[in-house]
Amino acid sequence: MARRDCSAFLPAEGRCTIATMARTAQVLVIVAAWAIPVVWIGAELGTRPSDGTVVWSSPVAGGDEWGSAVTVRRTYGDSLLLPGDVLLSIDGRPLDHWLAGETSSDVSVGETIRYHVRRVEDGSPREYDRTVTVTHFPLGRALVADLPQVLVALLLLVAGSVAFYLRPGLVAARAFLGFASLVPIGLASSPWGLGALDLAGGRGYWPHVVAQVVFALGLGLAVLAAATLPTPRGWLSRHPWVVPAALALPFAGYAVWVAAVSTGEEGAARTQALLAVAAPALVVVVPAALAVLIFGYLRASSRDTRLATRLALMVLTAGLGLLLLLGVLPERVVGDPVLPFDVLMLLVVPPILAGVVVALVGYRLDVIEPNVRRAVVQGAVAAVFGTAFVVVAATVGRAADVSVGSILAGGVAALVVLPLAVALQRRVRHVVFGDRELPRSVVAELRRLDSSTAPSEALTETLSVLCRRLHLSHAAIQLPGTDGPALASYGEPSGGGRVVVDLVASGATIGSLHLETHPLRDPFGRGDRRLLEDVGAQVGALVQAVLANRELQRSRQALVTAREEERRRLRRDLHDGLGPSLATMMMRLESAQELIATDPDQAAVALGGLADLAHDDIAEVRRLVEGLRPGVLDQLGLVSALRQRAAQHEQAAGGHGLAWRVEAEEVEPLPAAVEVAAYRIVLEAVTNAVRHSHARECVVTLRRDDAQLRVRIGDDGVGMAEGRPAGVGLSSMRERAEELGGTCTVASDGRGTVVEALLPLRAGEDS
């Protein structure tokens, strides 16, 4: 049964109150998550009696093994003991007795403890007795001394809080907040772990064990977050076993570790191994979390889920890879990491946490994930090369008995100086040769030229850029087949080295670029071929645009000329034909008006003559209108107008001579210019067939597609005589098609003549 949202039935004030309570609950959970590690560390360490030492080191991580003596790993405060001191006895008892289980009463603050230590001074070991006064653990100094670990813990809490605050209903966000809250408690076991005093009384092992167990539990929550990140809502309720399995996984790793050491370790070493809970849990959890994310990525059903899982995988894998390549491996090979582990943690952990939070929240995954992917690839390449350099430096150092540190310092110095040397070299070459080695830069500046510049000025500006960037004295553009002045030029010839670059556009050579270097500069060589090809391509495109602009200008001028010629023809026809006829009609009307009173019969005769004259003038007007655009196209359309002309021709011929018909599909509506051109071409072709072909039949076919109208006129006559020049009619048909950007072809053999015209429809619309 679906759960109902009861808040929907409440008034607005009630719903706001519920939302406020929910938000308050989120804040309280976050506060509790911060309070758990802070309170535990403050209470456990702040009240712990301490001698200022830490002797804990995990055997899983290769730490010093406990035995009859224990080495001091760290010291805090004003302790008389130093890191590296080997503790041989405490209060007169050997260390192995204390580690075997001998205990004393609790040690209080203010008491003194006597240590027998072995310390190496001036290359030789010496033994001392040191009396140390028990104090509270110097937590403030420890926080400052281990500030990187503290910052990592704080960043972890911030990341978990942000993820939970933004996605409180997401199981993965809740598990991640739990992980962020419990893992910092591990600071109480490392680096602030067992001290020498804890081995000989103090608080004993239990605070250390609790911190390690809580840390392992936090790792289990991390596995749970990885398992539920790519799952849909309700998945966990159908798979309840996932929670206990994830929480038990770290302890399974610890169990395997205990089983492995129980048969091989004894005494103090066995105690040390049993106290190591966090390290074996971490060894198991890290590959398990990655495997869970990979499995979730493979079964993800949505794109956002795949992006989120892949982002989490990438940041975790990249972070672990950097720790291995820059920390663990160099330490194993040369004895020291490339960077201190504290610095590595500060460099690696923040990007990992940011990537995980973005994956949990789902914020702009389609933008962030590709950028992270590119950064990971580039970082991986840099890390591999850096590690290879360290390994090579270590090998050379051992072979030549040279300090590895000095080799690494020299490599770093070379990396710092190399960009400066390259920049200086480029500057010198720029002064001497210009930008010949930077073809992309030159072409990029050519592309950035103002697009609103007039074409002729754009050519001159392009040549000026080339002269300036390549240190030329003269540059010119010449069209093929012309011996006259250049299309454009800049500078003056000075007798330097000359080179000619073909300008190619759309696969055709449209001109040549003539470049002349200054006499004091080096001429172009073979190494400059790429630059010249790139420049030629860019300038060729510009020249093509200029030539197209000139052709367009000529076409516009031709259109204007044709329009003015048509206006002149209309004016002449009106002035010489219709104008005098109307003037004559006016005079005869005035004469008829005078005859009405004196001679009505003669007036009637005059009016009858005026009627005939009016009919002639109307016919003349129709002829003029037909010359502009056939009116039948507006009345009937192209197909019907042609069929009407065919019927009129057949009726006038009386069944004798040429018969022609029209075959057409759905070709209308058509642009006006296309209609007129097709109509004129058909009539001209049919007229030629009637006059010259001696054909019995002529077929007109009209077909239309998305781009053009295809007009075909074919007859079965004798065809055209070979070698006969094209007449006015054929030239007129070609001109009408070419005006619209189309073509008109005529093919003829002994079986007839075919006229085929292709008329672009878009050109007709533009016109």
Image (spheres, rainbow, N blue to C red):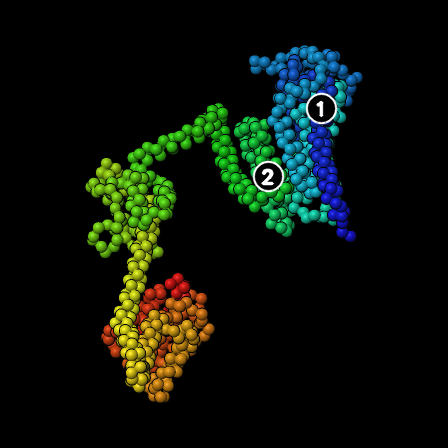
Q: Going 45% across and 71% down the picture, which residue do you hit? A: 668
Horizontal and vertical percent for residue 25? 73, 36
What is the three-letter code of the residue carrying label 1? Gly
Q: Secondary structure at mark 1?
A: helix
Q: Which residue is mark 2?
A: 355
Q: Earlier in the sequence, mark 1 or mark 2?
A: 1
Q: Nearer the viewer, residue 35 or 584?
A: 584
Horizontal and vertical percent for residue 251? 72, 36
Q: Which mark is residue 205?
A: none
Classify mark 2: residues with Cα within 10 Å, few (<14), some (14-19) or many (20+): many
The answer to which quarter of the image holds residue 132 is top right
Q: Going 71% across and 32% down the picture, which residue do you hit? A: 31
Q: Nearer the viewer, residue 342 or 516?
A: 516
Horizontal and vertical percent for residue 244? 75, 41
Q: Going 71% across and 29% down the picture, which residue do you hit? A: 35
Q: Nearer the viewer, residue 426 or 704?
A: 704
519 vs 86, left or right, is left
* Total numbered labels: 2
Horizontal and vertical percent for residue 714? 35, 78
Residue that extends furthest to the front in the rendered view of this protein: 598
The alpha-carbon separation of the residues under discs 1 and 2 comes to 30 Å
The answer to which quarter of the image holds residue 674 is bottom left
What is the three-letter code of the residue carrying label 2? Gly
340 vs 57, left or right, is left
Q: Going 25% across and 37% down the picture, which residue do you hit? A: 521
Is residue 307 in sight in this rendering? yes
Q: Which residue is mark 1?
A: 42
